Amino acid sequence: MEADYSNQTSGSLLIVEDDTILATTVARLLTSKGYTVTVSHDGAEGLEIAKGNEFDVVITDFRLPGLGGMELLENLRKVKPRLPVVMMTSYGNSDTVIGATKRGAFEYLMKPFNMEELIDVVGKAVKSSRLMFKPVAMGVPAKSGTTAIIGSCQGMRDVFKEIGRVAPTDASVLIRGETGTGKELIARAIYQHSDRSEEAFVAVNCGAIPETLLESELFGHRKGAFTGADMNRIGRLQQADGGTLFLDEIGDMPLSTQVKLLRALQERTIQPLGSSEDVKVDVRILAATHQNLEQYMSTGKFREDLFYRLNSVVIHVPPLREREKDIAELVSFFLSKASADFKVEASQFDKAILKRLAGVEWPGNVRQLENVVARAVLQAKGRVVTVEDIDGILEESGSSRMVQSGDDIEATLRSWVRGVLKEVQKSGAGDGHARLVSSLESTMITEALKLKNGHQGNVAELLGISRVTLRQRIKALGLGGEDDA
């Protein structure tokens, strides 16, 4: 018998569980967390419900009357291969775990499970589902309700071309850009245009997971591998088998985990913590960072061999301060989106606002601009938003600083040079010229590589030097760059 626990829109879940008491308890808990929950007590019925409706996640018992949970999983994989399925079982032997993993289970829970663990697993599964199913439009979308990468400036056109070039391949991609530039959207667009688009897309934020837990999160663990490991757990690499794993903020990954990731990339096998058995995985890696990995390598915080493994294709996402041409398109999109999200009358922006916004430095980039527009829409409630409104919001967020003029930049440069020379004078090192030239040259080449997407031939032409000289300077300065020779 199908039961419907309809609620608001944190996510849509189907629970297939023949234990009516457990099913009702789980459904009520998840409903209280904002999920829309449908319950079925029969495997065959649950399969038909899942096939005929849109769900973010299916949660199923392993043992069911008639069609079992494993058969339900297998059948769902045929018709909805990207739909995350969480298995619940009282029979957590290795065969069950391995079998569920091979058939594409997102995760499994051992009965009796902790309800906080259930909420955590469901939250991750829903997020994974949204990342896979919500399309990413490139350019200005026809409907503002879609997720989109907005931009028509040359820098963004270059990004779109790179996405089209690398998406059909299995090459690892390193997406570089400042915080808030939209690196995750770039990764999702690559995935959605790839040959793996019908398989899983699993995202892991390496900077948001404690160092002690990240290795287990990626590679999984066996029961007893460490204190608190009371059951076997598959890792994100296995969950993404056949699909794509997105490693956000990879610059924050500890060295010990970098070693294991490099081995997984080279040998296409992993070893869960506490296990000596190799598990084969077929995963495409997309990584992103806002960190200076070249500097991290020079200080030993990031492995060179992993960097060059990931650096085969690099996409540089330009910061918003270099995208003045895109401000109007972005504002228009975010206005419509915020009005729809908050269910308020669409606001209009005073024309002078666009000029004001184009001059802001935007340390938080596109994400920050979206936040500013959303706050303006909430405050205005349908009236015309003025420059004074925007100035107030920018002041509150501490982001009213304008992009520096040529005179400001020159003054800043003089101040920096003076500071370096004072340090040299104090230390008595007598290397002021070498220190200043090396730092400026490093910045110049790094920014040129970003501008030309790592293409050394184009960088050499831009700087007016030979490729041989450029390569020599890159090596001497310890910089990275795609060698196109």
Image: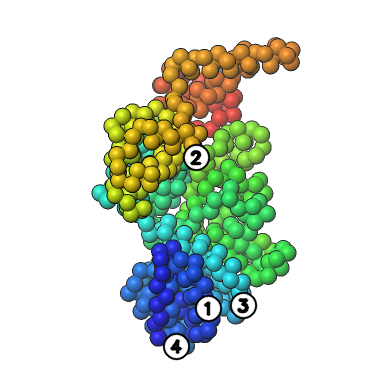
| Structural distance between the alpha carbons of marks 1 and 2 | 41 Å
**Label 3 belongs to which residue?**
112
Left or right, residue 417 beside residue 184: right
**Label 2 belongs to which residue?**
179
- 332 w.r.t. 14: above or below: above
**Which label sits on residue 25?**
1
The residue at 45%/57% (across/down) is: 201
**Label 4 belongs to which residue?**
66
433 vs 142, nearest the viewer: 142
Of callouts 2 and 3, the N-terminal one: 3
Left or right, residue 106 beside residue 166: right
- Disc 2 versus disc 4: nearer the observer: 2
Going by the numbered disc 2, the residue's amino acid type is: Thr
- Counting from the top left corner in percent of width and height, residue 226 is at 72, 63
The residue at 66%/46% (across/down) is: 255
Of callouts 4 and 3, the N-terminal one: 4
| Structural distance between the alpha carbons of marks 4 and 3 | 23 Å
Residue 75 visible from this viewpoint:
no
- Disc 3 versus disc 1: nearer the observer: 1
Q: Are marks 3 and 1 in contact (CB under 8 Å)?
A: no
- Counting from the top left corner in percent of width and height, residue 150 is at 34, 42
SS of the residue under disc 1? helix
Left or right, residue 444 beside residue 426: left
- 185 w.r.t. 355: above or below: below
Left or right, residue 403 beside residue 436: left
Residue sitting farthest toward the bottom: 65
> How is this picture coloured?
rainbow
416 vs 232, nearest the viewer: 416
Question: Circle 2: is it few (<14), some (14-19), or many (20+) Cα within 10 Å?
Answer: some
